Amino acid sequence: MSALSQMLKQRSGQFAETRAEAFLKTQGLAPVARNWRCRFGEIDLIMRERDTLVFVEVRLRNHGGFGDGFDSVTLSKQRRLIMAARHYLATLGTVPPCRFDVVALRDGTAPAWMRNAFSDVG
């Protein structure tokens, strides 16, 4: 991938995260962290809904040719997000209830929000 392509992809990802965060705020969630990174990966958004910590994966699709954004959160990606979330939770004094959500965005449409998109079962 060329440097220009990489930069454009990064900017579109940042725009998608900004759009997803704004949408979730209208739904009553409060931002906690954005682009939180550790050795296991990155969590796009960490939000709070009442007493629940919400780890959010943001997916952007410019067209529907490869399925929706929900389909693109593979089992491997879920495992990385779970490991990163565990690492984040280890930094807290007490561990609140938490869940994993996905916000899928497509140009020209409203954000699609899947609560409890997957869970940490192990």
Image (spheres, grey):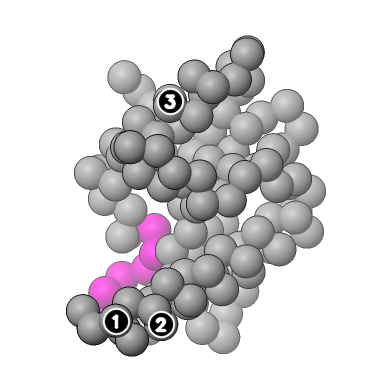
Residue 30 placed where, x, y %?
A: 75, 45
Q: Earlier in the sequence, mark 3 or mark 2?
A: 2
Look at the numbered discs 2 and 1 and tell me whether their residues touch, using CB distance below 8 Å.
no
Q: Which residues are magenta?
A: 64-71
Residue type pointed to by label 2: Leu
Residue 58 placed where, x, y %?
A: 48, 59
Please name the residue that numbered disc 1 is placed on.
Answer: 3
Please name the residue that numbered disc 3 is placed on.
Answer: 86
Q: Quadrant of residue 95?
A: top right
Q: Is residue 5 above or below residue 61?
A: below
Please name the residue that numbered disc 2 is placed on.
Answer: 8
Q: CA distance from mark 2 to mark 1?
A: 9 Å
Residue at 49%, 19% in the rendered image:
90
Residue at 47%, 70% in the rendered image:
13
The N terminus sits in image quarter: bottom left
Q: Nearer the viewer, residue 2 or 89?
A: 2
Residue 98 placed where, x, y %?
A: 57, 28
